[in-house]
């Protein structure tokens, strides 16, 4: 994708200046660039920011790698999963409303990493009380950034993906539809 971006930038430059360019694009450069925010967190000193924003070289203990209880995947009563991404205050409040844990004083300090394992255990227990589809059909689920984790079999039939026509079947093979989409020159759909 970064090569495609570089090519478009090069074409625009050539169109505007009459001069081409050489594009040097490596996958390792792209993966590092996509981690810019995490590299920033890693350089953050704990004070005056909350320790939860300092990135540690451990899996599952950081804000965005399933360390935080409000940014995690939880198993539901039917053995399926929901993804939770309620980082911002409004989403966190909605998560507390959805799960019924808003009055639990343990959830008053969500950015304290020392409390995260205990809070995750409590949330896990609550999410195991209902099926994935029950959770996701709750009116508060979207406001709480709770979404179903879909299998590859389920993904093409999800209402959002159907409405977007995000998948096509070509020669009996289900596959992602061409993207991005252009209004004036739509991509040809595979047959």
Image (cartoon, grey):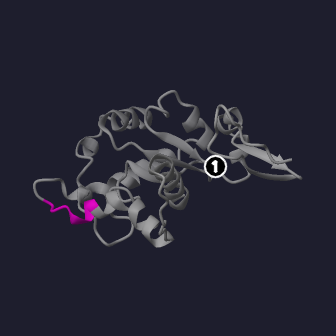
| Residue 74 percent location from the top left of the image | 50, 52
- In magenta segment, residue 44: yes
Q: Is residue 180 left or right of residue 49?
A: right
Q: Is residue 22 magenta?
A: no
Quarter where residue 48 is shown: bottom left
Secondary element type, mark 1: loop
Identify which residue is drawn at 56% across, 48% down.
76
**Residue farthest along the left direction in this orientation:** 48
Q: Nearer the viewer, residue 85 or 18?
A: 18
- Crowding at dot 1, Cα within 10 Å, few <14 / some 14-19 / many 20+, comes out as some
Q: Position of residue 56 (x, y in %)?
A: 28, 68
Residue at the spot 88% in from the left edge and 52% down from the top edge: 172
> Vertically, is 142 above or below 63?
above
In depth, the one of 16 and 74 nearer the eye is 16
Q: Furthest-top residue in view?
A: 139
User: Which of 183/133 is in front?
Assistant: 183
Q: Does the image show residue 48?
A: yes
What range of the chain is rendered magenta? Answer: 40-46
Read off the residue under disc 1: 150
Q: Quadrant of the N terminus?
A: bottom right
Q: Residue furthest front?
A: 18
Residue 62 x %, y %: 32, 61
Q: Is residue 158 left or right of residue 104?
A: right
Please report the residue visible at 69 percent of the width from the left and 42 percent of the height from the top: 166
Q: Residue at point 56% right, 37% down? A: 136
Position of residue 185 measured from the top left corner of the image (x, y, whole percent) = 69, 36
Does any portion of residue 62 appear in the rendered image? Answer: no
């Amino acid at each position: 994708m970064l090569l495609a971006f570089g090519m478009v930038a090069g074409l625009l430059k050539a169109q505007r200046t009459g001069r081409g360019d050489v594009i040097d694009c490596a996958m390792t450069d792209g993966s590092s660039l996509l981690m810019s925010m995490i590299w920033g967190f890693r350089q953050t000193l704990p004070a005056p920011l909350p320790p939860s924003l300092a990135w540690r070289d451990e899996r599952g203990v950081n804000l965005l790698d399933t360390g935080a209880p409000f940014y995690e995947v939880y198993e539901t009563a039917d053995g399926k999963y929901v993804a939770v991404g309620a980082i911002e205050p409004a989403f966190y409040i909605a998560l507390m409303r959805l799960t019924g844990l808003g009055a639990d004083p343990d959830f008053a300090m969500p950015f304290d990493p020392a409390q995260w394992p205990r809070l995750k255990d409590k949330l896990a227990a609550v999410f195991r009380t209902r099926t994935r589809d029950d959770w996701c059909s709750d009116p508060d689920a979207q406001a709480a950034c709770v979404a179903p984790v879909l299998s590859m079999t389920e993904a093409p039939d999800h209402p959002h993906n159907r409405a977007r026509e995000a998948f096509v079947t070509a020669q009996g093979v289900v596959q992602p539809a061409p993207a991005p989409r252009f209004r004036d020159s739509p991509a040809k759909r595979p047959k």
